[in-house]
Image: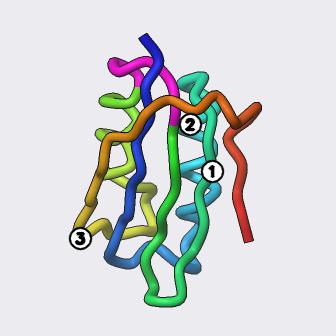
Amino acid sequence: METGLEFRVTGRVQGVGFRAFVQKVGQQLGLTGWVRNNSDGSVSGVAEGSQGLLVEFIKQVKTGNRWSSVKGLEEQPQRYSGDFQTFEIRY
């Protein structure tokens, strides 16, 4: 069953390749959605796919890449929209 989630990550997550990391994780897991930087220094986005893959996605996003330092991760379940074709970086 396909589902979705909205997420927001805080910590050292801008200027360290974090959006590209999140995009790569999403693509590798076959998820769709987007990720972007926010003006407050956080990173947020939407991911859609199967529940099990979203759990793995959040686990990897919480870990981050080697240059980032994730301090917090908020996630909010949302209904699957099917609006996304790929996992993209938004600007």
User: Percent x, y for residue 82?
Assistant: 64, 28
Q: On screen, 68 above or below 1?
A: below
- Does the stretch in magenta take in 49? yes
Which residue type does callout 3 highlight? Lys
Which residue type does callout 1 highlight? Trp
The quadrant of the picture occupied by the C terminus is bottom right
Ranked by sequence position, the earlier of labels 2 and 3 is 2
Residue 34: which disc? 1
Q: Are marks 2 and 1 in contact (CB under 8 Å)?
A: no
Residue 90 appears in which quarter of the rendering? bottom right
Residue stretch in magenta: 48-53
Q: Secondary structure at mark 3?
A: strand
Which residue type does callout 2 highlight? Gly
Residue 26: which disc? 2
User: Percent x, y for residue 7?
Assistant: 39, 55
Q: Badge 1 local density, few (<14 within 10 Å), some, or many (20+)?
A: many
Residue 71: which disc? 3
Q: Are marks 3 and 1 in contact (CB under 8 Å)?
A: no
